[in-house]
Amino acid sequence: MRQVVLDTETTGLETAKGHRIIEVGAVELSNRRPTGRSFHEYVNPGRAVDPGALEVHGLDNEFLADKPPFGDIADALVAFLDGAELIIHNAPFDLGFVNHEFRLLDAAAPALEERCTVLDTLVMARERHPGQRNSLDALCKRYDIDNTGRSLHGALLDARILAEVYLAMTGGQVALILADEDDEAADHAMAHRPVEHRGAPLVVRAPSDEERRAHAATLKKIDEASDQKTLWSLRHG
């Protein structure tokens, strides 16, 4: 199963007010393992960044001035995302901006949801933790995921953190070390995968005489220390 964890940063909150994407970050998972492939681009939005957005991500107009326009990265982004299950926190926001950018290039461009399936981790978190805070930072705290490097939002960093949150919420593989997605990191991640035992042969081995004597001696010490009040003493006394 191929999955891509996606995040964006923007000049503001609403495409209807002319806001644009300024950063796209994505990391790839295959069968719940990081593949080492990622996508990351800064984008010149052709407009000023709102002060409120600047406080969130710190990407100012001067930094973005020499970056490519979205049209220059569009084909590479489509190639990276196409056919994957997209994992996004608050998917309507990011999908809305990505689809808006594609439609500025081609009014007939299909929505990203037509190319990919989408899993919204915010919806998942609200279902699992109703009435609680379910921001990415709150989920990191809840699942004991290190996000100390996240003083500001960044699309690639947030995608990597979200990958860990998603895997924690769905049953395993935390601490993927996605910042260094080499073979060693992938092997480390595999060591944290849940093991499926159903259907495996059950091996029963009887203890040796020496193990039986050691076990009996240990029980005797526990009995003596508890003044013969252990559960097995009470049952067999």
Image (spheres, grey):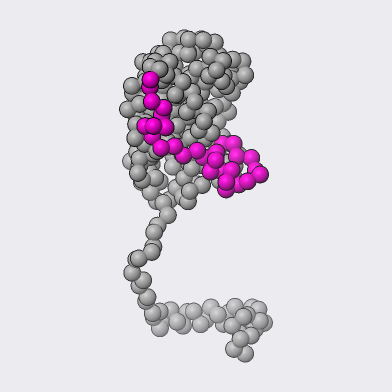
Provide residue 111's location: percent of width, then percent of height. Answer: 41, 27
Position of 217 relative to 199 (above/below): below
State whether residue 25 appears in this view: yes
At horizontal 44% and vertical 42% (from top left) the residue drawn is 176
For the residue pair 237 and 63, the one nearer the viewer reads as 63
Is 190 on the left-hand or right-hand side of 233? left
**Image quadrant containing the N terminus:** top left
116 or 178: nearer the eye? 116
- Asked whether, in this view, residue 91 is left or right of residue 199, the answer is right
Viewer-proximal residue, 17 or 157?
Answer: 17
The quarter holding residue 136 reads top right
Q: Residue at x 56, y 15 (%)?
A: 17
The C terminus lies in quadrant: bottom right
Q: In the image, is residue 123 part of the stretch drawn in magenta?
A: yes
Q: Residue at x 47, y 51 (%)?
A: 171
State whether residue 161 appears in this view. no
Q: Which image quadrant for residue 35?
A: top left
Q: Position of residue 146 (x, y in %)?
A: 54, 39
Numbered range of the magenta stretch: 108-137
Residue 226 rendering spot, x and y as whole percentages: 65, 78
Does the segment drawn in magenta span residue 89?
A: no
Q: Quadrant of residue 200?
A: bottom left
Tell me the residue at 45%/13% (across/down).
44
The x and y percentages for residue 177 are 44, 39
Q: Residue furthest bottom?
A: 237
